[in-house]
């Protein structure tokens, strides 16, 4: 872990330890936002952007699947359909369907 390393959309521009002695990386995202991220989350791939990617995914989901259709997705998932199968039906990724199901509105 050093300055200049890239993790997804994040570029490490500084490294320090917080008061709990955890390693924190000051990163700049491709969108321009700076964010402090635990080094552990960068190394293990848990953090790959400042949050801008998640917003892009949600926007894409909402343009492909109207919110009125979410109840259909919940019913299909509750009846045993896989995220992959539902995603294929709606033309979005498995992760998008999982996100919808995990964050019921």
Image (cartoon, grey):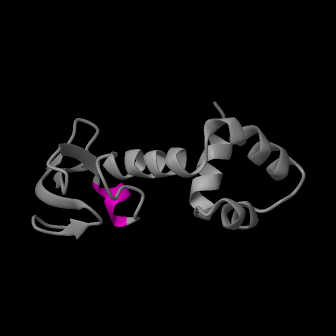
Which residue is nearer to you in this view: 98 or 24?
98
Q: Quadrant of the C terminus?
A: top right
Horizontal and vertical percent position of residue 17? 19, 46
Main secondary structure along the magenta-highlighted residues: helix
The count of marks equals: 0
Which residue is farthest right?
A: 79
Q: Is residue 16 above or below residue 83?
A: above
Residue 68 within the magenta-colored segment of the rendering: no
Report the residue at 71% width, 42% height from top: 69
Q: Which residues, given as a range, are shown in magenta? A: 39-43
Which residue is nearer to you in this view: 52 or 87?
87
Report the residue at 68% width, 35% height from top: 68
Report the residue at 34% width, 65% height from top: 43
Which residue is nearer to you in this view: 48 or 73?
73
41 with respect to 70 (left or right): left
Q: Is residue 56 above or below residue 85?
A: above
Q: Is residue 21 above or below residue 12?
A: above
Which residue is farthest top?
A: 105
Report the residue at 75% width, 47% height from top: 73
Q: Name which quarter of the figure residue 33 lies in.
A: top left
Horizontal and vertical percent position of residue 21? 25, 44
Which residue is nearer to you in this view: 68 or 26?
68
Horizontal and vertical percent position of residue 96? 57, 55
7 with respect to 101 (left or right): left
Q: Name which quarter of the figure residue 5 lies in.
A: bottom left
Horizontal and vertical percent position of residue 63? 50, 47
Q: Quadrant of the N terminus?
A: bottom left
């Amino acid at each position: 872990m050093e300055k200049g390393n890239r993790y997804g959309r994040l570029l490490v521009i500084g490294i320090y330890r917080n008061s709990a002695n955890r390693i924190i990386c000051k990163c700049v995202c491709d969108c321009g936002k700076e964010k402090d991220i635990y080094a552990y989350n960068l190394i293990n791939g848990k953090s790959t952007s400042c949050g801008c990617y998640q917003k892009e995914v949600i926007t894409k989901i909402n343009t492909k699947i109207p919110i009125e259709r979410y109840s259909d997705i919940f019913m299909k998932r509750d009846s045993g359909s896989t995220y992959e199968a539902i995603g294929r039906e709606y033309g979005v990724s498995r992760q998008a369907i999982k996100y919808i199901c995990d964050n019921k509105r």
